Amino acid sequence: MAHKRYTRYIHALCAALILAGCGGEDGEGGAGPQAPASSVQESADATILPRENCASAAAGIIEAHSEAMGGFSNIGSTCYANSALKFLIHSADAKRLANHLHAFAAASNDGHRHAAQQFVKLIESTYSQAGPMREDLSNFFASLQALPAFSQVNAAGEWRFQIVGRQQDASEFLMKLSESFDLSALYGTAIALKDFNNQFSTSHEYWTVLKISSPDDSLQDIFDSTDAAGWRVSPGAQPRQLTVRIDSARHDASGTHMLGTGNFDFNQAVILHATDAADNSRLTITLEPREVIEFRGADNAGHYRVYAKDGKWSRHDDDQIHTLDQMPAIDNARLINFAIAKIETAS
C-alpha cells in the first residue's frame, strides 16, 4: 500500500488534570482574590518576553500559532484556568477556535451567546498589542459562571464550581468548557487507544490516559508499551493531533507514589504504532510534542504552568512568559499534546 502522509503540523486541544491551588511559584494554600506575586525564579536558559513584545497582530485580529501570546493575570487561584485556556487556545489554533465560537454564538441562546462572545474577546486580546487585561478574564469567568455547566449550587447555595477564588480541578474546567461550547465538534477523536482501561467515558474527553510503569520511562517507552492493535485511526479521517494525559501515580499497600516524568524529552519526536480501523493495516505515526501542562507542588497547594512550541519553546506561568533554548525535563507533566507530523503505512 502506498505511503500515507499528513504533512501539516497541527495542534490539539485539551486540558490539564489534578486539583490545585494556584498562586506563586510554590503554590498557595488558601484561595483568595489576590493576584500572585510577579517574581519568578529564572532558569539559565530562559528569557523574559517584555510586555510590549507580546503581540502578533492588531487588536481584534488573531494570527494562529503566534509565539507572542500575552500573559494571563492570576485573579484569585486561577492558575488552573489560565493554564487550561492557554493550552486550549494554542493547541486548537486560535483562529479556528474563534471561528467555531462565532458560529456557536450565532446559534445559541443569550447566556451561551454572551459567554462565547466573551471567549472570542479574550482570545483576540491574547494576541493584541496590549495583551489580555484582568478585565477580559474577569468578564469571561463571570459569563461562564452563569452557564448551566458552572452555575450549579450546593445545599448552602454556594457554587459547586466557583471559578475565581477557589482551588479547582483543571481537567474538570476544560470538560465544562467543552460541554458549554460544544468543543467536541471542533477537535474530534480520530485516534484513540481503545481498550478496557482507556475507553473514553464521555464524548467530551479528548485525551487518552497513558500510565508510567517506571520512573525511568521515556515518552517513547510509554508508547512502545501499548499495543498497535489498540490504537485505532478512524476510517477516512485525517488526524490533526493526539493528546495524552499522563498517569504517573503508583498505588500500593503503603500508599500513592508519584513516579514523575523527569525522563521525558520533549525536544524529540516519538513514534506511535497504530492500526487503520478501515482495513486493519498497520500505521507508523510520527508525533511531535507541541504543548505541555506541568503541575508543581501538592494537590492542596500547587501550581500549573504551560509550555508551548512555536519554533522555540516558551513557558507561560500566569502573566510571566519566558522563551527557552529547549524544553526542560519536568517532573510532573500532566497533559501533553502532540502534532501529527507524518502517518505512513508500516512496512
Image (cartoon, rainbow, N blue to C red):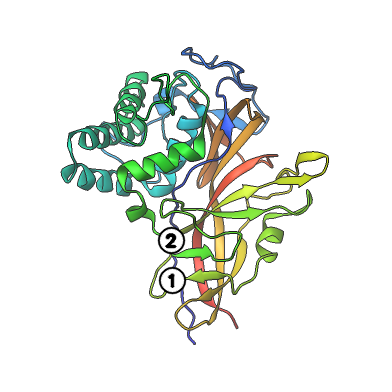
Q: Quick one: which residue is furthest to the right in this view? A: 254
Callouts 1 and 2 close, C-beta under 8 Å: yes
Q: Secondary structure at mark 1?
A: loop
Q: Which residue is mark 1?
A: 234
- The quadrant where residue 270 appears: bottom right
Q: Position of residue 206 (x, y in %)?
A: 46, 53
Amino acid carrying mark 2 in the image: Thr
- Separation of disc 1 and disc 2 at Cα? 8 Å
Q: Residue at x 64, y 70 (%)?
A: 227
Decide: is 158 above or below 230: above
Q: Position of residue 40 (x, y in %)?
A: 60, 21
Amino acid carrying mark 1 in the image: Ser
Q: Which residue is mark 2?
A: 189
**Mark 1 or 2 closer to N-term?**
2
Q: Quick one: which residue is furthest to the bottom in this view? A: 1
Decide: is 231 above or below 36: below
Q: Position of residue 169 (x, y in %)?
A: 52, 34
